[in-house]
């Protein structure tokens, strides 16, 4: 099992996603002889998981059932252990597209945090790209490095425990793109510029406050970055439902013909699919500031 390659069968040491429902999932590390308790009963790893195909419907001890899914960056974002606030798929999708990431891209990131964005970047740049990620907090850096090895993407990432605002990313002139998610991104703009290739590249900074955005944009302009823009992404999910609508009576179809005695039903209706906007929705998460380093 790898987060960047699909495996057909579950093996010992794999991470699997136990799907109990759309709003209820849990990650499990598969181990010989281990058990996982769910509200539907116990799952025995040796009997119920190892050797089974990903996507299998597994019957639990109490007679209920769950699906065992192959891990993906999207599922990991929904199920990872939160060591920090994380980015979700709405922002991640825009970041990976606007940074123009592709296989073989080299990316610098700070900070690593819980690794939500890191896994999405790794899946995008595999199999020959590389991620240089910097985390200021030592325990978070060590835990992230452990997870990358466990998810079998460790060969694609280098984790550094240092202050990016003072020490930079530890590389120079190699990055196609840089991502910043730190309290004072304007202090790391020069280090980001130094880490990027001479041919130029793209930079993204995530900040929850507009004052951070103002300082970052000023620093980007001072360092010669171009195409500076800031956006905010808000997700509105519409619910699809079936409703019954009455058909209006417009009279006979052919009024010139002699009316017949056949009665016309007055309660004719039709079933329609429609959508309704949510009564409430998630609000502001943060601002995404993008910029381009021009070719030197």
Image (cartoon, grey):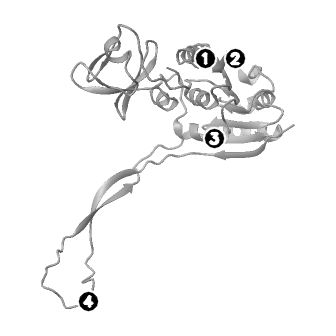
Count residues near mark 1 (Cα–Cα under 10 Å), then give few for <14, some for 14-19, many for 20+: some
Q: Mark 2 points at which residue?
A: 162
Q: Name the residue under label 4.
A: 255
Q: Is residue 239 above or below residue 111?
A: below
The residue that appears at 77% across and 39% down in the rendered structure is 220
Quarter occupied by the C terminus: top right
Q: Nearer the viewer, mark 4 or mark 3?
A: 4
Q: Do the residues labelled 3 and 2 touch (CB within 8 Å)?
A: no
Distance from Cα at disc 4 to Cα at disc 3: 59 Å
Quadrant in the picture for residue 175: top right
Looking at the rendered structure, the secondary structure element under dot 2 is: loop
Q: Which mark is residue 97?
A: 3
Looking at the rendered structure, the secondary structure element under dot 4 is: loop
Residue 20: x and y in percent read 33, 29
Count residues near mark 4 (Cα–Cα under 10 Å), then give few for <14, some for 14-19, many for 20+: few
Count residues near mark 3 (Cα–Cα under 10 Å), then give few for <14, some for 14-19, many for 20+: few
Distance from Cα at disc 3 to Cα at disc 2: 28 Å
First in residue order: circle 3 vs circle 1: 3
Q: Nearer the viewer, mark 4 or mark 2?
A: 4
Task: Point out the residue furthest to the top here.
Answer: 33
Q: Are marks 2 and 1 in contact (CB under 8 Å)?
A: no
Distance from Cα at disc 4 to Cα at disc 1: 77 Å
The residue that appears at 55% across and 28% down in the rendered structure is 116
Task: Point out the residue furthest to the right here.
Answer: 296
Looking at the rendered structure, the secondary structure element under dot 1 is: helix
Q: Is residue 136 visible?
A: no
Q: Name the residue under label 1.
A: 154
First in residue order: circle 4 vs circle 2: 2
First in residue order: circle 4 vs circle 3: 3
């Amino acid at each position: 099992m790898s987060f960047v390659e699909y495996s057909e069968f579950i093996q010992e040491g794999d991470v699997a996603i136990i799907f109990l429902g759309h709003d209820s999932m849990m990650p499990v590390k598969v181990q010989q002889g281990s058990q996982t308790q769910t509200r539907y009963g116990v799952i025995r790893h040796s009997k119920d998981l190892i050797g089974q195909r990903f996507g299998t419907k597994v019957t639990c001890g109490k007679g209920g059932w769950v699906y065992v899914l192959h891990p993906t960056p999207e599922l990991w974002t929904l199920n990872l252990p939160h060591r920090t606030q994380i980015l979700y798929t709405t922002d991640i999708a825009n970041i990976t597209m606007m940074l123009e990431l592709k296989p073989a891209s080299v990316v610098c990131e700070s900070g690593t945090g819980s690794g939500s964005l890191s896994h999405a970047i790794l899946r995008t740049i595999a199999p020959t790209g590389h991620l240089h990620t910097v985390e200021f907090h030592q325990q978070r850096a060590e835990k992230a490095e452990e997870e990358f090895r466990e998810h079998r993407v460790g060969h694609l990432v280098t984790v550094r425990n240092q202050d990016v605002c003072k020490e930079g990313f530890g590389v120079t002139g190699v990055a196609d793109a840089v991502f910043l998610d730190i309290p004072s991104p304007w202090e790391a703009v020069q280090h980001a510029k130094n880490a990027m290739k001479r041919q130029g590249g793209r930079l993204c900074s995530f900040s929850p406050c507009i004052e951070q955005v103002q300082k970052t944009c000023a620093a980007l302009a001072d360092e010669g970055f171009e195409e500076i823009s800031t956006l905010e992404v808000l997700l509105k999910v519409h619910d699809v439902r079936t409703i019954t609508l009455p058909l209006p009576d417009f009279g006979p179809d052919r009024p010139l013909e002699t009316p017949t005695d056949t009665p016309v039903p007055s309660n004719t209706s039709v079933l329609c699919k429609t959508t309704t906007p949510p009564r409430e929705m998630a609000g502001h998460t943060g601002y995404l500031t993008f910029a381009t380093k021009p070719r030197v």
